[in-house]
Image (tube, rainbow, N blue to C red):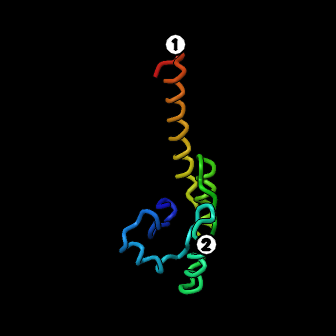
């Protein structure tokens, strides 16, 4: 998220009380899988904080889509360079794992 200039204010299930108290300062509430709609609706009404409902981002492609949707909602541009670098890292990691699980004598790392 930081690569697109987006900072996370608080994660409801993993934040301190002080962080949760700053929730009204949020620019956007992101609901994963539709959990927390009532709370988001109240925050939208009380603090004019919009919300979006997104699926859990499983895997690389869904993670990229997740990031793109959030950036679009906030009027920010995703960093294509960052995304390509992350994809390359993930592909390399998978390649190394596969080579260790299915070793090929002619392949040296």
Mark sitting on residue 65: none
Rendered location of residue 54, percent (x, y): 63, 62
Rendered location of residue 5, percent (x, y): 49, 65
Q: Nearer the viewer, mark 1 or mark 2?
A: 2
Distance from the alpha carbon under mark 1 to that under mark 2:
54 Å
Characterize the local packing of mark 2: few (<14), some (14-19) or many (20 or more) Cα atoms within 10 angstroms. some
Characterize the local packing of mark 1: few (<14), some (14-19) or many (20 or more) Cα atoms within 10 angstroms. few
Name above or below for residue 29 compared with residue 64. below
Question: How many badges with numbers are in the image?
Answer: 2
Figure quadrant of residue 80: bottom right
Name above or below for residue 73 compared with residue 83. below
Rendered location of residue 75, percent (x, y): 60, 71
Q: Nearer the viewer, residue 46 or 75?
A: 46
Q: Are marks 1 and 2 in contact (CB under 8 Å)?
A: no
Residue at 37 percent of width and 68 percent of height: 16
Rendered location of residue 28, percent (x, y): 55, 73
Q: Is 72 on the left or on the right of 15, as rendered?
A: right
Residue at 46 percent of width and 61 percent of height: 2
Residue at 49 percent of width and 66 percent of height: 6
Looking at this rendering, what residue extends furthest in the top direction?
A: 105
Q: Label 2, on which residue? A: 37
Q: Label 1, on which residue? A: 105
N-terminal of the pair, mark 1 or mark 2, is 2
Mark 1, secondary structure of its residue: loop
Figure quadrant of residue 18: bottom left
Mark 2, secondary structure of its residue: helix
Residue at 59 percent of width and 46 percent of height: 59
């Amino acid at each position: 998220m930081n690569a697109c200039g987006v900072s996370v204010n608080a994660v409801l299930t993993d934040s301190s009380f002080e962080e949760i108290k700053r929730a009204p300062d949020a620019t956007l509430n992101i609901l994963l899988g539709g959990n927390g709609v009532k709370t988001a609706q109240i925050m939208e009404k009380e603090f004019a904080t919009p919300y979006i409902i997104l699926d859990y981002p499983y895997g690389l492609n869904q993670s990229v889509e997740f990031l793109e949707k959030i950036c679009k909602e906030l009027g920010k541009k995703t960093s294509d360079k960052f995304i390509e670098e992350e994809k390359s890292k993930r592909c390399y990691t998978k390649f190394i794992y596969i080579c260790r699980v299915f070793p090929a004598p002619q392949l040296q790392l």
